Amino acid sequence: MDNLTSALRRFDRVAVPLDGRRHAAVAIAISLDANGSGAEGGPAIWLTRRALKMRAHARQFALPGGGVDPGEDAVDAAVRELGEEIGIVADRSASLGLLDDYATRSGYVITPVVLRVRDGQRPSVNPAEVSELYRITFDELAVEPRFLTIPESSRPVIQLPLAGHYVHAPTAAVLYQFRELALYGRVTRVADLEQPVFAWR
């Protein structure tokens, strides 16, 4: 964790102007384990699958997050959404830093917020927003991504094999940049990684 904290302090993030898009934030919430025992694979982050009845992007994989409300910044929004979606409590002091903004095809600019949350918290999923919750260890994040070509775009579509499925951008792009920094200390830009067509709406 010390190496990641130092890497985030040095990280020169790229901010993207909204230009009419809505600002959103996601939480990359790191915990030692799910019960504080240290026996569940070491550091990990929480990944969700959106509920079937969500108005947008139903059943897609996502990090806890949502729109930045008036009077909030990205850290405030990420902390709030983390609690609302999966019941993990944090505050602003848990923030280790921000990654690059990612502009989506559906009209958002997403700011990823890396948080070190208190160990031993047991998540409590909000079924209105989350259908499934996965604990993804840093070892699992070491998986190699796949890059696909599609006729609709010149940009490669990224897929990360996680939780028995393929996770796509924007979540895959955010997690890939985090993986590069957290596991290898590498700065890897991901703005040119494409989303699948089903996520464009």
Image (cartoon, rainbow, N blue to C red):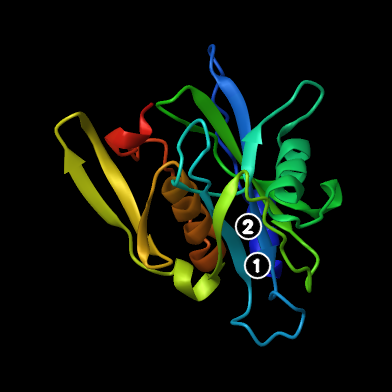
Image quarter of residue 79: top right
Q: What residue type is labelled 2?
A: Ala
Question: Which residue does the image show at 69% across and 55% down from the upper left?
Answer: 86
Above or below: residue 20 compared with residue 55: above
Horizontal side of 16 relative to 83 (left or right) equals left
Q: What residue type is labelled 1?
A: Asn
Q: Residue furthest left?
A: 151
Residue that mark 1 sits on: 3
Q: Can residue 44 be seen in this view?
A: yes
- Looking at the rendered structure, the number of numbered marks drawn on it comes to 2
Question: Which residue does the image show at 44% across and 41% down from the upper left?
Answer: 170
Secondary structure under badge 2?
helix
Horizontal side of 60 relative to 5 (left or right) equals left
Horizontal side of 158 relative to 121 (left or right) equals left
Question: Which residue does the image show at 52% across and 67% down from the upper left?
Answer: 183
Which residue is nearer to you in this view: 46 or 122?
A: 122
Expressed as whole percent of the image width and height from the top left, the position of residue 33 reads: 68, 76
Image quarter of residue 38: bottom right
Residue that mark 2 sits on: 7
Expressed as whole percent of the image width and height from the top left, the position of residue 58 reads: 46, 40
